[in-house]
Amino acid sequence: MAFIEAYDLVKRYIRPDGQELVAVDHVGFAIERGDSLGVIGESGSGKSTLARLVLRLIEPDGGSVSIDGVDVRGLRKGDLRRRRSGWQIVFQEPFASLNPRMRIEDIVAEPLVVHEPRLPAKERRDRVVAILEEVGLSGDLIERRPGHLSGGQQQRVGIARALITDPSFVVLDEPTASLDMTIRASVLRTLERLRRDRGLTYLFISHDITTVESMCTHVAVMRHGQLVEDGAACDVLSSPQAPYTKELLSARLLVDPGENRARRELEDLVAAEQQSKEAAGCAE
């Protein structure tokens, strides 16, 4: 049994006009302990919804999730709350996920207050300082507030908060999307070091294929809520089989302008496939 196993996950929403939107449509995957699965796809493809379903931050309409042999969907609220110390998430927008009125010490220590309420204050502070230093920040920042930090520092605070309870599984939902290239590379190196040193298992949500290629052992490609291709990162990203995956890969910045012809051919292929499906639907 894999460390993380998701089966047939479904999430539906009802639009204001009454129409049904299937955000995640029967998606399943597995992640081995210590590995990192990258989920890629365009905006609106269902990536973030999938991440929240895995942690049961939102309730699925169908399917199941198992983490280290535990049936996540079958847990009662109290049991789920206790388990959350081992399953954490780092959000996309660091400042939006940090309370601007709280000191950094209180933000990072909050999971300890919830999950280890009897921990002495001095030991709690020592653990906050230690985890801040582990993610590349100075322990002297504990008295500051998020607005006094840079975007990269804010995201490192978010990472520290996620790791303070020593989790085994971390969801990274576009963790570097709002950072500039230099800071992004530094944060990614920190995340990879932490994965190796702590034996963490990652579910890495991103629209940046280059980032996923450098961070993840496996890749899953989503489109319109469905999984269109998955496998080892080296296989999917070097020899994609699905037309949509080929289109995603062709959309990366090109070093050789001569490759534009190949990109246009792939776009034509995807368009032709879509037209064929629409024609078949009309014929039915």
Image: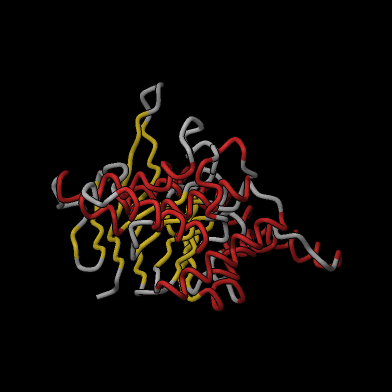
- In this image, 58 relative to 239: left or right? left
- Count of marks, rendered view: 0
> Which residue is located at x 39 percent, y 51 percent?
125
| Residue 139 percent location from the top left of the image | 52, 54
| Residue 196 percent location from the top left of the image | 47, 75
- In this image, 43 relative to 172: left or right? right
| Residue 54 percent location from the top left of the image | 32, 54
> Which residue is located at x 26 percent, y 63 percent?
67
User: Foreground: 106 or 135?
Assistant: 106
- In this image, 190 relative to 52: left or right? right
Residue 224 visible in the picture = no
> Which residue is located at x 76 percent, y 60 percent?
253
User: Foreground: 216 or 270?
Assistant: 216
- In this image, 11 relative to 78: left or right? right
| Residue 37 percent location from the top left of the image | 45, 66
Residue 220 versus residue 51 in the image, above or below: below
> Which residue is located at x 39 percent, y 36 percent?
21
The quadrant where residue 245 appears: bottom right
